[in-house]
Image: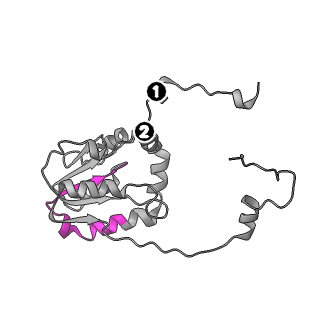
């Protein structure tokens, strides 16, 4: 049998999946969240920005977009928020419920398992603060900024705050001749074959 005639069977569950399903599924496993939580610079920066600004969070309604394990929700609750709503579409939502309860924040924090854009009723008309860890590689990789802006336009009260509210991208041009030769300019060796198709 030639490789060109080989097909991989697709399950019924996979047939209906969209790219969004695969994206959220990648955040359903605890490993990626463990990696983020163990990034002490990231986690402690969020913790400090929230807990050192308790005066901004006290008695406020806070919305966390893509709350994952609920860590930012719990920081907001520690800072004195009267209500925190965490939205998480991935399966990690179920563990987040347990984590929030185990830490004694289940009276203050409400978690919603849905895509932000699909939520009709948040349970409140407006929120005072939106928090989110929306940044990915090269800042925009995860494509969550659009979701945060959607939530801002729909639920953020006038004069409300977004954490974080600024970001910078620094870039410079480089050339890695060894990488270029290896990936593009194959100069020698048995693997140098024409791998393009005629138009």
Quick check: 121 above or below 154? Answer: above
Give the extent of the magenta segment: 46-68
Residue that badge 1 annotates: 13
Q: Which mark is residue 101?
A: none
Residue 150: image location, x then y, percent: 27, 54
| Cα distance between the residues tagged 1 and 2 | 11 Å
Q: How is the image coloured?
A: one colour
Residue 188: image location, x then y, percent: 86, 59
Q: Earlier in the sequence, mark 1 or mark 2?
A: 1
Question: Is residue 153 toward the left or the right of residue 5 in the image?
Answer: left
Q: Which residue: 40% across, 62% down?
A: 43
* Residue 86 in sight in this render: yes
Residue 83: image location, x then y, percent: 17, 52
Residue 114: image location, x then y, percent: 30, 41
Q: Is residue 65 magenta?
A: yes
Report crowding for label 1: few under 14, some 14 to 19, many 20 or more residues within 10 A (C-alpha). few
Q: Which mark is residue 21?
A: 2
Q: Quadrant of residue 128?
A: bottom left
């Amino acid at each position: 049998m030639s490789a060109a005639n080989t097909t991989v069977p697709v399950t019924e569950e996979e047939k209906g999946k969209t790219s969004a399903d695969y994206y959220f599924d990648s955040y359903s496993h605890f490993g990626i969240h463990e990696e983020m939580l163990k990034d002490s610079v990231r986690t402690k920066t969020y913790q400090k920005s929230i807990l050192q600004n308790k005066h901004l969070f006290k008695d406020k309604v806070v919305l966390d977009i893509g709350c994952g394990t609920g860590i930012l929700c719990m920081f907001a609750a520690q800072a004195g928020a009267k209500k925190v709503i965490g939205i998480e579409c991935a399966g990690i939502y179920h563990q987040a419920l347990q984590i929030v309860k185990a830490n004694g924040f289940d009276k203050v924090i409400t978690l919603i398992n849905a895509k932000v854009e699909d939520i009709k009723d948040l349970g409140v008309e407006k929120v005072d603060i939106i928090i989110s860890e929306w940044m990915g590689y090269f800042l925009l990789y995860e494509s969550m900024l659009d979701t945060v802006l959607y939530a801002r336009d729909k639920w953020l009260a006038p004069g409300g705050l977004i954490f974080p509210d600024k970001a910078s991208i620094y870039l410079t041009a480089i050339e890695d001749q060894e990488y270029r030769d290896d990936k593009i300019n194959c100069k020698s060796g048995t693997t140098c074959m024409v791998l393009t198709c005629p138009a």
